[in-house]
Amino acid sequence: MTDANHDKLRKLVEQDVAVYNSGNVEKLVELFVDDWVDHSQGVRGIEALKQGIVELRTAFPDISIAVEDVVVEGDKVAARFTMRGTHSGEYLGIKPTGRTVEVNSFEISRTRDGKYAETWGVLDLFSLLTQLGIREMPQDI
């Protein structure tokens, strides 16, 4: 692995997080290939990703995601994130609670031509639901 490759993929992660933080979903076309797929959530394509980000930002309008760690190996990049935000809109069928949350997530992505091609990720959903005061799993999950 070259330092240039590491720097390029770390910048890709940071630009991706900037989209979530700013809501500028039009920037995604610069970061993801057209046939991108998230294997963890069964999401395909940039339009579906845009919709997911809009829904997340509607539920947590003050969302702030921080990049905690990045590891690069060849065409793959692994990253750990911390998301913070206030639950001000409906999320996963849960009415707004006004509670502030802090949740960790991890992703491994394969890149192609300097863009995300495939992603596998894990969000600490149990921690999120607990912080929202949910005692039973919502039906929509």
Image (tube, rainbow, N blue to C red):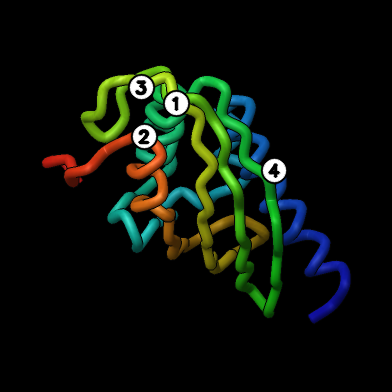
* Mark in front: 4 vs 2: 2
Amino acid type, mark 2: Leu
Q: Residues within 10 Å of mark 1 (few under 14, many from 20)?
A: few
The Cα–Cα distance between marks 1 and 4, rounded to whole angstroms, is 27 Å
With 56 as the anchor, is 41 left or right in this view? Answer: left
* Mark in front: 4 vs 3: 3
Residue, disc 4 = 15
- Indicate whether 69 appears above or below 31: below
- Indicate whether 95 appears above or below 82: above
Which residue sits at x=67%, y=59%? 114
Residue 8 locus on image (x, y percent): 78, 59
* Mark in front: 1 vs 4: 1
The Cα–Cα distance between marks 2 and 3, rounded to whole angstroms, is 7 Å
Residue, disc 2 = 132
Pointers 1 and 3 in contact (C-beta within 8 Å): yes
Judged from the image, the secondary structure of the residue bearing numbered disc 4 is helix
Residue, disc 1 = 99
The Cα–Cα distance between marks 1 and 3, rounded to whole angstroms, is 5 Å
92 or 128: which is nearer to us?
128
Pointers 1 and 2 in contact (C-beta within 8 Å): yes
Judged from the image, the secondary structure of the residue bearing numbered disc 3 is loop
Sequence-first tag of 4 and 3: 4
Which residue sits at x=68%, y=79%? 74
* Disc on res. 20: none
* Disc on res. 97: 3
Pointers 2 and 3 in contact (C-beta within 8 Å): yes
Which residue sits at x=26%, y=35%? 92
